[in-house]
Amino acid sequence: MLELVRLNLLSPMVLAFVLGVVATLVRSDLRLPEQLYTTLSIYLLLAIGLKGGAELSETQLSTFWQPALATLALGIGTPIWAYYTLRGAVRLDIANAAAIAAHYGSVSAVTFAASQTFLEGLGMQYEGFMPTLVALLEVPAIVIALFIARIQLGTGSSWGAVLHELLAGKSILLLLGGLVIGFLAGKPGLAQVAPLFVDPFRGALTLFLLEMGMVAARRFQDLKMSAGRSLLLHCLCRSATA
């Protein structure tokens, strides 16, 4: 157990995040160039898609369809559960409740990458099609939250514009595009680009989490809710994703 905690909390990725927080709190002049941050996010998303697509190319449909169906069910059910919990128990307004419901019903590609790297560090095996489920989980929660907001508030863009923005957004486009490329190229194709998209992945993630630590620390002062209400809000939303 102690070894598991050590591997989790003392990994270079987590410690880089902590360093980013410390750098901001001590008002260091440390900054990652915006272009580098954008490049790292593109790299990580495409790398996740490529590896997932290559694994998916060797996965039988009979193995994949049940996890995919369960993922879609969670992507639809979680934002609904979270929205009504936030409206009833925490008494948030419609816009904020819908936004937070979308956040917790969706998924963070960076969190997924960190979890993936952690499991690989432990030598634990997991299904290769997991990046496909990340892409599946991203869409329903946002659509459901937008639907709730439109119904309750009676405002918003047309559904065509919303879906275009969602599917053409950087995260979904890179994940799905990487999945398709990896699926068509297979593992032999992935091996050709492994020196760029596989081997340096953890190093790139470490740099990205350094920036994430600085971003998180800059948001500390934006917290307006009391500590008790913030804790309740977090616990309720996390329970929706459990």
Image (cartoon, rainbow, N blue to C red):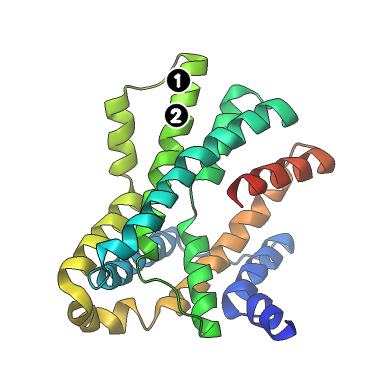
Can you give x and y, in whole percent of width and height, for residue 53 in the image?
27, 67
Label 1–label 2 contact, CB within 8 A: yes
**On screen, 27 above or below 138?**
below
**On screen, 242 above or below 187?**
above
Q: Nearer the viewer, residue 175 or 44?
A: 175
Can you give x and y, in whole percent of width and height, for residue 34 in the image?
44, 58
Q: Nearer the viewer, residue 135 or 28?
A: 135
Identify which residue is drawn at 69% across, 86% down: 3
Identify which residue is drawn at 59% across, 35% down: 81
Farthest front residue? 62
What is the quadrant of residue 8 in the picture? bottom right
Identify which residue is drawn at 41% across, 21% down: 156
Residue 45 seen in this snapshot: no
Can you give x and y, in whole percent of width and height, for residue 231 in the image?
77, 45
Amino acid type, residue under disc 2 in the picture: Leu
User: Alpha-carbon neighbours of circle 1 within 10 Å: few (<14), some, or many (≥20)?
Assistant: some
Q: Quadrant of the N terminus?
A: bottom right
Q: Secondary structure at mark 2?
A: helix
Amino acid type, residue under disc 1 in the picture: Arg
* Residue labelled with disc 1: 150
Residue 86 seen in this snapshot: yes
